[in-house]
Amino acid sequence: MVPPGTIDVHAHHFPRDAPPVEVIAGFPRAPRLVVDSPAVGRLVRGSEDFRTVRRALWDVQARLEDMDRAGVGVQTISPVPVTLEYDAPAAPFAAYCRWMNESVARAVDAADGRLVGIGTAPVASPRDCLPELRYLSEVLGLRGVEIGTRINGMELDDPALGYFFDAVDSLGLAVLVHPVDGGGGAVRRSGFTYDFGLGMPSDTALAATALVFGGVLDHHPGLRVATVHGCGTFPWAYPRLRLGAQLAATHLPDELNRTVSRLYADTLVFDPAHLPTLVHRFGPNRVLLGSDHPFIPGQPEAGIADLASMAPHLPPGTVPRILRDNALEFLGLSSGALVTAHFSPTKEDHHGTH
């Protein structure tokens, strides 16, 4: 059964082993891990360092120790967003996604039920994506798929991506939407402060707007989609977006409100005063604990403390839902479900065909 306690839905994993040879040959900039010491490593793209990382990113035991210190019972792990390289050559990137998904499944297998896996897929290539979605769901037992806010330049409501949402809806997979490339031009200034503080939230809001106003959620009534980083600036911009749609006579306000209440958003907003806005915008049953572990210092401890401090300002029963129940619903699990992956690593399976 799902272990008791808090569930953190926004955390990242990276394999310690090297990508397959065919990936490196055809996709030289494929992100990979270089371990420099027992505690610290680097993510590298081609010959360039991308970021320094902690052991918990690749080591399950270190991750579980972090979770114990934070009081987290279960964590959902997904690939690091820099791996969502949708413009990479199709065949090597498909092999890279397979390698990543199998690593996520092995981590889940090693965690005695305390990790839930969300995988990745080569979404820009339907020929490669559909088999990978079936593999990560039906063979590996992962619960969802992570996608970027844009897919090789396409917004999420692009008709060319309809096949993807049809497939995940049919398979019952959850979808986790994560910003990529520091917002990738969503704002006109660049640099880490602008990318992290404005680019990523703005990019996430653009993706949410595409899902709501572009008809993706309306066309897929069973789809479960979560946006991270509190859905970016969308919760605050939505009233103006709704009014704009009303003035343009493109959408009815009540219908938009119902569609917005289908979205999930995590709590990673860095100010407890923002949490009531998330609950007001999406509803008490659509907000999820998210930490970005192991990247954000002080998380998830600070996020859990912020929720506790705001409990008097939220509808009764909201905090327990955010800490556990909503995550079970998003992931398509029940409290009595067995959290496991089905992957048993073998030499033949590790570089499986597509």
Image: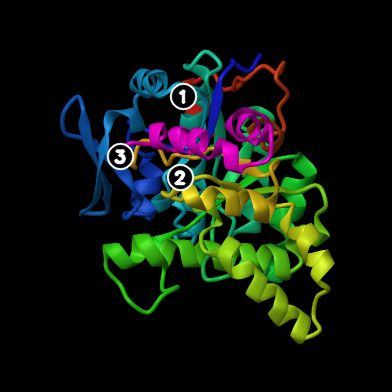
Whether residue 66 appears in magenta in the rendering, the answer is: no
Report how far apart the C-alphas of labels 2 and 3 lie in the structure.
29 Å
Residue 334 drawn above or below residue 31: above
Label 3 sits on residue: 297
Identified at 41% across, 49% down, the residue is 270
Residue at point 71%, 73% (across, down): 242
Residue on which the image places disc 1: 107
| Circle 2 Cα neighbour tier, 10 Å, few/some/many (<14 / 14–19 / ≥20) | many
Where in the figure is residue 136, as x and y percent of width and height?
62, 36
User: Could you tell me the amino acid type at mark 2?
Assistant: Tyr
Q: Nearer the viewer, mark 2 or mark 1?
A: 1
- Of the residues under marks 3 and 1, which one precedes in the sequence? 1
Q: Position of residue 106 (x, y in %)?
A: 48, 23
Residue kind at label 1, given as amino acid type: Ala
In the figure, is residue 102 to the left or right of 341? Answer: left
Question: For the residue carrying disc 3, how many other residues have a C-alpha within 10 Å: few (<14), some (14-19), or many (20+)?
Answer: few
Q: Amino acid at mark 3?
A: Pro
The residue segment tinted magenta is 297-326
Q: Quadrant of the N terminus?
A: top right
Q: Nearer the viewer, mark 2 or mark 3?
A: 3
How crowded pointer 1 is (Cα within 10 Å; few <14, some 14-19, many 20+) is rated as many
Instruction: In the rendered structure, find residue 160 and report the number of the disc placed on it.
Output: none
Is residue 130 left or right of 117 when viewed as pictured?
A: right
Give me the disc on residue 96: 2
User: Which label's residue is closer to the chain start, 2 or 1?
Assistant: 2
